[in-house]
Image: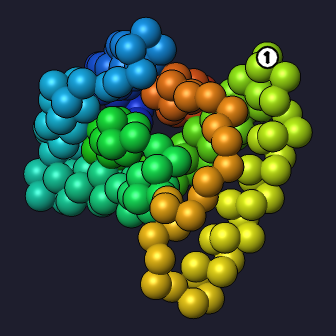
């Protein structure tokens, strides 16, 4: 059993992760902020669980740090262009500390799907689907240009009118918990 599997199969660790995710989702939904005490404390708890539940302690710690790093590596560019807030990036990093790198990358796919569905729902509710599609098209073209020539920060140039704020901590919670549920169904 590898180190991340040891944590993923531990009911205490998964219960703690679930509790932290639900708390973050509720707080983010109410205030559009995810507090540092929750994300940083959750990172410490995730690293502690990864360390304690693995064979040699150092390998569990490395697995937790790998998951934290994988989440940060994927989401920091989105923070840089102001698509996500810092709390969202730290919350996914917290998940990574529990899950390890491979599971974190898989969970991120579920998170992105949940976030896309949530964004679509917000756009439909605000009758702004056309504006959302225009923003997406503009952002895609600009990202391709920035990737080709560089020089200007993408966040400065993406000037489409926002469809509205989205508490992405809710999507992180739903997506991560959906990944964990799907994993349990696939590996009874």
- Determine whether, in the image, residue 90 is placed left or right of residue 114: left
Q: Residue 111: give x, y in percent of width and height.
A: 58, 39
Residue 45 visible somewhere in the drawing:
no
Nearest the eye: 60 or 139: 139
Residue at numbered disc 1: 125
Residue 89 visible somewhere in the drawing:
yes
Nearest the eye: 139 or 84: 139
Quadrant location of the C terminus?
top right
**Residue at x 31% of width, y 59% of height:** 69
Which type of secondary structure does the marked residue at label 1 adopt?
Answer: helix
Task: Say if 23 sits above or below 120 in the image.
Answer: above
Find residue 89 and report its image quarter. top left
Task: Say if 154 sits above or below 151 in the image.
Answer: above
**Residue at x 18% of width, y 35% of height:** 40
Q: Residue 155: give x, y in percent of width and height.
A: 49, 59
Find residue 99 and report its image quarter. top left
**Residue at x 78% of width, y 41% of height:** 132
Q: Residue 103: give x, y in percent of width and height.
A: 48, 49
Q: Residue 78: give x, y in percent of width and height.
A: 48, 55
């Amino acid at each position: 059993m590898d180190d991340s599997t040891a944590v993923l199969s531990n009911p205490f660790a998964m219960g703690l992760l679930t509790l932290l995710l639900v708390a973050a989702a509720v707080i983010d939904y109410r205030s559009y902020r995810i507090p540092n005490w929750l994300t940083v404390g959750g990172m410490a708890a995730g690293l502690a669980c990864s360390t304690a539940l693995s064979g040699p302690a150092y390998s569990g710690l490395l697995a937790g740090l790998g998951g934290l790093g994988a989440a940060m590596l994927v989401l920091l560019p989105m923070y840089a262009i102001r698509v996500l807030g810092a709390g969202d990036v730290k919350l996914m990093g917290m998940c990574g500390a529990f899950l390890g790198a491979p599971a974190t990358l898989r969970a991120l796919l579920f998170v992105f799907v949940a976030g896309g569905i949530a964004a679509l729902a917000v756009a439909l509710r605000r009758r702004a689907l056309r504006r959302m599609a225009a923003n997406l098209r503009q952002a895609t073209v600009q990202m391709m240009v920035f990737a080709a020539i560089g020089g200007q920060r993408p966040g400065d140039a993406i000037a489409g009118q926002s469809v509205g704020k989205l508490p992405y901590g809710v999507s992180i919670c739903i997506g991560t918990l959906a990944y964990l549920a799907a994993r349990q169904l696939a590996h009874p």
